[in-house]
Image (cartoon, rainbow, N blue to C red):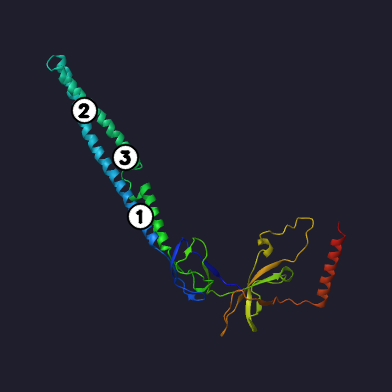
Amino acid sequence: VRADIVQIAPEIAGRVAEVAVRDHSRVEAGGLLLRIDPAPFQLALEKAEAELEAARVLVETSRATYHETRSELGELESRADYLLRQARRQQDLATRGVAPAVRVEETQSDALVARERINVLRQRMVRLLTTLKGDVDLAVDDHPSVREKLADRDRAALDLARTTITAPTGGTVVNMRLQRGEQVRAATPVFALVSDRRPWVEANLKETTLTHVAVGQPVDVVLDIYPDIVWKGEVESISPATGAEFAILPPQNASGNWVKVVQRLPVRVRLQPFAGEPALRAGVTATVAIDTGQRRSLMDIFESMAKLGRGSASAAGSP
């Protein structure tokens, strides 16, 4: 008898703060199983939120600085044009001997300083625009640095949510040995949950007996734990491959010393419920009888034995 068994494994590592179930206790889907100490994960979330706000402020500051610099640059360019005109005018006056040479030098120096300041502001705008990824109007939360911090915040929130572990399905807790205060590791099962979904029977039948077996055929099942009860069922599915195909070391039939071994294929049998049915326990053994609707006569049996004998003789005589 088989049943769906879910291995309960925390997705984060931490110290167990609460165990809400015990061995063989039943739990509904979504029911609390255990809690991991949330304190370090709460701190991580608060840190991530603070870093997110800092990243947002940095982007807003860069944007404001860019607009201020652009405004200052416009004013300075206007002043630089004025100073350049003044320098040319003073140069003309000095040529006619009306203005002193020192005045010419002063106006030219002021114009040169303004031009150097313009170059500095332009370089600053380029840096700020690079920081803003080339788009001053880009939404703050769309900025790459902010998106990174958003992802960090969401990850921290997800880890905090994962400190509460609930049942993925209704079922019965088994192999519960966990105690409060123990340390658990991520992705390491701490106990199992046998699902409430109806169990089924898995019959590993020899390939030589599956000739006429088909999906939907009626089945009689007797469990060793309930030897006086016959369950009615039907063939639900037949495996497309033998069990040997899934072995760690599958058989290598191409070798010269190959020995033929009868293979087995898993056949899934669905059991029909009935009033007063006792509990079905996963792992108990069963006897299965499938009604294929085929009847063999003595002549068919003798012919099969004869074919088997001829096949053995032929195989023995081949080089």
Residue 17's spot in the image, x, y percent?
42, 67
Image position of 23 with respect to 72: above or below: below
Counting residues from the start of the chain, the first of labels 2 and 3 encountered is 2
In the displayed structure, does residue 265 sit left or right of residue 110?
right
How far apart marks 2 and 3 lie (CA) works out to: 25 Å
Name the mark on residue 128: 3
- Classify the position of the N terminus by image quarter: bottom right
Give the number of the mark in front: 2 or 1: 1
Q: Amino acid at mark 1?
A: Lys
> Tag 1's secondary structure?
helix
Residue 165's spot in the image, x, y percent?
45, 67
How would you rate the neighbour count of disc 3 (Cα within 10 Å): few for under 14, some for 14-19, many for 20 or more? many
How would you rate the neighbour count of disc 1 (Cα within 10 Å): few for under 14, some for 14-19, many for 20 or more? some
Counting residues from the start of the chain, the first of labels 1 and 3 encountered is 1
Name the residue carrying label 1. 47
> Tag 3's secondary structure?
helix
- Closer to us: 165 or 228: 165
Give the number of the mark in front: 1 or 3: 1
- Closer to us: 274 or 159: 159
Residue 48's spot in the image, x, y percent?
36, 54
Name the residue carrying label 2. 81
